[in-house]
Amino acid sequence: MVSHPLYDHINDIQDLKKFTEGHIFAVWDFIPWLPGKNPETRYFINEIVLAEESDLSSDGKHLSHYELYLRAMEDIGSDINKIKDFIFRLQKGDNLQEAICELSVDQRIKEFLNFTFNCIEGGKAHIIASVFTFGREDLIPGMFTSILKNIQSKFPEADLENLIYYFQRHIDLDGDEHGPLALRMIEEITGDDPDKWQEVKIAAKEALAKRLGMWDAIFESL
């Protein structure tokens, strides 16, 4: 994932728009979560929710990471209508699976979303923790470092301040704080149960496969 060919193929502002228009769905589905009973795990969950829903923007205001990413997309002229229409449907109370099914996006983006919520509906805390940790927290610093290195000098005409801030914020948070906490959470939830550890591995591989599918979909759209 860190060396995916997608990063080197973002060569103009249209490519960058395409990337953000696909990736925004991963940004949105970042925090669905079921809390565990362990106090340390509860603390970590609260820490994550606080950062995801009420982090500081580059101008010192409190915004969710989803809202910050939308602002960054607007700065560069990306199409935000699909994700906003999707969220609006959910706010109205529409069925989640139907809303995902009717999205006019690549099937692999839909599969990424469906996988996340199928894991949540399964109700197994160690599987949910695995998908969150290995499909997000542990992966993001290296993944976002790769794209950040690629875009910082390529688009001098574009307003990338908020987009760069978003990526750098996640690199800092997930690499220094959330990543290590997430790994500890896996250990606390899974304990010494070999069956749970096997399911953790399987879920981690599936989560990475779904993320890879999303990246491939965006890559092919450039």
Image (cartoon, rainbow, N blue to C red):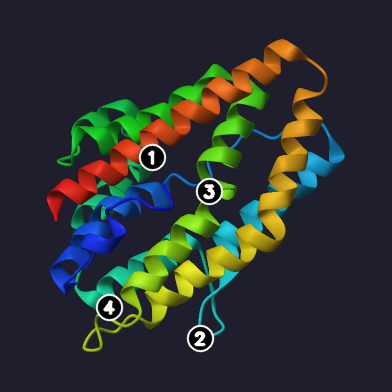
Which amino acid does the dot numbered 2 rest on? Asp
Mark 3 or 2, which is nearer the eye?
3
Q: 75 above or below 171?
A: below
Instruction: Name the residue beneath numbered marker 1.
Output: 211
Q: 90 above or below 180?
A: above
Residue at x 51%, y 40% (from the top left corner): 135
Which amino acid does the dot numbered 4 rest on? Asp
Relative horizontal placement of residue 73, taking residue 48 as reference (left or right): left
Instruction: Name the residue beneath numbered marker 3.
Output: 139
Mark 1 or 2, which is nearer the eye?
1
SS state under label 2: loop
Mark 4 or mark 1, earlier in chain? 4
The CA distance from mark 1 to mark 2 is: 31 Å
Which amino acid does the dot numbered 1 rest on? Arg
Which of the 4 image quadrants contains residue 204?
top right
Which residue is more in the foreground, 88 or 151? 151
Mark 4 or 1, which is nearer the eye?
1
SS state under label 3: loop
The CA distance from mark 4 to mark 2 is: 14 Å
Instruction: Name the residue beneath numbered marker 2.
Output: 59
